[in-house]
Image (tube, helix red, strand yellow):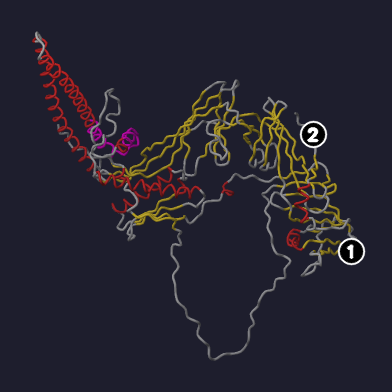
């Protein structure tokens, strides 16, 4: 089918409209036949603007207003001389109404020269509904048509009226102007009183000084100690041995720990329980609760005890961020000498800005019918308000974030520029191409001259594979005590999107990706636009092409690291490669890492020796069985001698291996002590130090 290129309007008679609106037909502003209705503008917020031109008879014009609409009428009424445009007064009964529940409003015109007046006012009305049509051609152009559906429930026929529609940005409210307001005044007397009673006494009270709203309170007994939870058991392997691969099967040496197995287990159990509470809190925060402050309380001064409470607060913040809470919505405050210890989750003083305030400005819209039309009482009209060409074409939109999005396939979408100077309101959009219907979409408000991308079909021609990972990178060292390093890290979150086109033609795909408040985009495709709070990244795909893009965002976190843990070693290795590494820490730590590498090499050698010993023992078992079998076999002397010689060689190998392992373990023990001692001696408040001397 083809859409015709000229404007039309249609009046849709509706039995259901008549049935539902019949109760309101008697509740409208009635005017005499001499006060013709000239213009009606319907808004999206439940009001309509009326403009009439009335003939003055006997020096007055009378309108009848339903009692429940008097306030709206008075609040908005303007009366002007049709020629001079000077305002005129209006008179109405002070109280009460006619027997039929209506109030007569009489406009007094004392000047006999005034023959006609212009009246304007607003009153309640059903909101208009927008509907759009887009016709796509093959030359980067689209035909955009807009329709407004208006419902006439006013109780009177709009006869040859200029009808317009306005945006929802216009505000409206009720205000009582008709009621008589009297002000109470105190009666004063001149009597002199010689006996004066004292004022009445009462009990005193104190307000809460902080006025804070506490959402949750967690004491030290339920929050894990990050420095202990991050440790590994003494029997667990260390992190990787060398920065470069040696090509051998590696078994790093055990890492010395500052805590016992029981302590580590206890803190890990706390972490598991606390994470369940974190998930519940994150759901509430993501549902719209205002920003929060994590208040870390310490019984003592801001020393190790105070730092431990702050570490727990930062652990809690990091876990909330992992659950999707925007980093900018969570702050940490430290309170020393508080007489208590733990973390309170407090609602921030300034609530989060509402969604309506954070959205993109949509401006105003105002469209008007090209010519006067008639809309009968109790019917609806579908009025063409827009018919224009626009820049636009067919693209693909990958949206896995929206409620009706899709994580596996990209949507087929129409991308176009709003050609008008007004906002296009939210409404359904029907898309036509090549003379046929190809899909439907729903658009959010489109500001003037802005670009919109509206998905309308899911044809599964662009396939998406998506994976996410994250890592931390040390950016600043804060404190270092007894091997516990408090750092500021950049927490990086990487999204890899692989796009595969099975189309026969080249196409463009727009990737929708929201960057939450507090995150910063550090790597992405170069070309991008914004859709609300989300970024739209443009990717060009050739026919049958597969392409992978990376989107990286980061946010600062504070982490507590135990330098004996594998994670800390890897983070430190990466940090020391930076030219901005703190020299007070870098020089001694590099020497400690060489000891760490030495330990890993020793552990790897021990692994190799033990593997050989296992092979020797297995071979010895085979040889013993073979020798036992040959004892009853005649003429086996030469073979028996050979087997016995091999058995002695295997036994010597086991003995040598055992001695070697013992020596290596002693060497490993010494290296571990050197490493542990060096880690404990590291400081940031002194000049660069050297690690403990080598003991070989």
Give the farthest residue toward the front: 632
Quick one: label 2, few (<14), some, or many (20+) residues within 10 Å?
few
Q: Does the magenta run of residues contain 208? A: no
**Res 99 → quadrant:** bottom right
C-alpha gap between disc 1 and disc 2: 46 Å
How far across and down, in percent of the image, does residue 454 sit? 63, 35
Q: Secondary structure at mark 1?
A: loop
Q: Nearer the viewer, residue 341 or 304?
A: 341
Disc 1 target residue: 59
How far across and down, in percent of the image, does residue 434 sit? 71, 25
User: What residue lies at 10% left-to-right and 19% top-to-bottom?
Assistant: 648
Q: Is 158 located above or below residue 177 in the figure?
A: above
Quick one: label 1, few (<14), some, or many (20+) residues within 10 Å?
some
Please tell me whether the stretch drawn in magenta is mainly helix, strand or loop: helix
Disc 2 target residue: 6
How far across and down, in percent of the image, does residue 204 sit? 44, 75
Q: Which residues are magenta?
A: 570-597
The answer to whether residue 139 is left or right of residue 118 is: left
């Amino acid at each position: 089918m083809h859409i015709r290129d000229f404007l039309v309007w249609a009046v849709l008679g509706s039995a259901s409209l008549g049935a539902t609106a019949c109760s309101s037909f008697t509740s409208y502003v009635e005017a005499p036949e001499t006060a013709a209705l000239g213009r009606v503008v319907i808004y999206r917020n439940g009001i309509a603007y009326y403009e009439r031109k009335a003939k003055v008879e006997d020096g007055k014009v009378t309108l009848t207003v339903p009692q429940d609409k008097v306030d709206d009428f008075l609040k908005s009424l303007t009366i002007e001389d049709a020629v001079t445009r000077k305002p005129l007064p209006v008179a109405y009964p002070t109280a009460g109404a006619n027997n039929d529940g209506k109030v007569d409003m009489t406009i007094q015109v004392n000047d006999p020269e005034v023959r006609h007046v212009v009246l304007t006012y607003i009153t309640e009305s059903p909101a208009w509904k927008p509907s759009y049509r887009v016709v796509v051609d093959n030359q980067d152009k689209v035909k955009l048509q807009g329709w407004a559906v208006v419902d006439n429930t006013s109780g009177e026929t709009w006869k040859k009226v200029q009808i317009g529609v306005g945006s929802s940005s216009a505000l409206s409210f009720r205000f009582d102007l008709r009621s008589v307001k009297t002000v109470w005044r105190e009666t004063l007397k001149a009597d002199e009183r010689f006996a004066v009673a004292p004022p009445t006494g009462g009990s005193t009270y104190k307000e809460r000084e902080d006025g804070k709203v506490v959402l949750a309170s967690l004491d030290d007994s339920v929050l894990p100690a990050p420095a202990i939870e991050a440790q590994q058991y003494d029997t667990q392997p260390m992190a990787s041995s060398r920065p470069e691969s040696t090509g051998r099967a590696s078994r790093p040496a055990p890492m010395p720990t500052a805590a016992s197995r029981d302590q580590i287990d206890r803190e890990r159990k706390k972490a598991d329980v606390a994470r369940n509470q974190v998930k519940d809190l994150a759901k509430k925060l993501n549902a719209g609760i205002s920003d929060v402050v994590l208040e870390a309380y310490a019984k003592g001064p801001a020393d190790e005890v105070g730092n431990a409470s702050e570490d727990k607060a930062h652990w809690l913040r990091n876990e909330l961020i992992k659950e999707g809470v925007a980093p900018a919505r969570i702050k940490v405050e430290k309170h020393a000498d508080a007489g208590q210890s733990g973390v309170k989750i407090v609602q921030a003083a300034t609530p989060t800005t509402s969604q309506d305030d954070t959205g993109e400005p949509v401006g105003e819209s105002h469209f008007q019918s090209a010519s006067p039309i008639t809309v009968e009482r109790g019917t609806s009209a579908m009025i063409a308000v827009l018919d224009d060409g626009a820049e636009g074409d067919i693209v693909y939109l990958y949206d896995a974030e929206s409620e009706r999005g899709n994580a596996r396939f990209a949507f087929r979408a129409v991308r176009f520029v709003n050609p008008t100077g007004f906002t296009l309101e939210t409404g359904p959009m029907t898309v036509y191409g090549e003379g046929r219907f190809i899909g439907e979409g729903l658009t959010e408000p489109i500001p003037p001259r802005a670009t919109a991308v509206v998905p309308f079909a899911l044809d599964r021609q662009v396939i998406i594979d998506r994976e996410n990972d994250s890592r931390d990178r040390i950016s600043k060292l804060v404190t270092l005590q007894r091997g516990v390093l408090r750092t500021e890290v950049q927490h990086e979150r990487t999204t890899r999107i692989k796009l595969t086109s099975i189309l026969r033609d080249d196409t463009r795909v727009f990737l929708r990706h929201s960057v939450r408040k507090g995150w910063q985009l550090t790597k992405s495709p170069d070309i991008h636009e914004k859709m609300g709070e989300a970024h739209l990244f443009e990717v060009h795909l050739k026919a049958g092409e597969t392409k992978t893009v990376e989107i990286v965002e980061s946010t600062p976190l504070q982490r507590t690291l135990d330098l004996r843990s594998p994670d800390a070693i890897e983070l430190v290795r990466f940090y020391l490669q930076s030219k901005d590494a703190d020299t007070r820490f870098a020089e001694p730590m590099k020497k400690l890492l060489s000891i760490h590498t030495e330990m890993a090499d020793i552990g790897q050698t021990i692994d190799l020796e033990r593997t050989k010993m296992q092979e020797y023992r297995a071979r010895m078992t085979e040889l013993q069985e073979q020798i036992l079998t040959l004892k009853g076999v005649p003429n086996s002397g030469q073979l028996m001698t050979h087997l016995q010689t091999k058995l002695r060689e295997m036994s010597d190998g086991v003995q040598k291996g055992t001695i070697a392992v013992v020596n290596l373990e002693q060497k490993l023990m010494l290296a571990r002590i050197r490493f542990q001692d060096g880690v404990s001696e590291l400081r940031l408040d002194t000049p660069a130090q050297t690690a403990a001397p080598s003991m070989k």
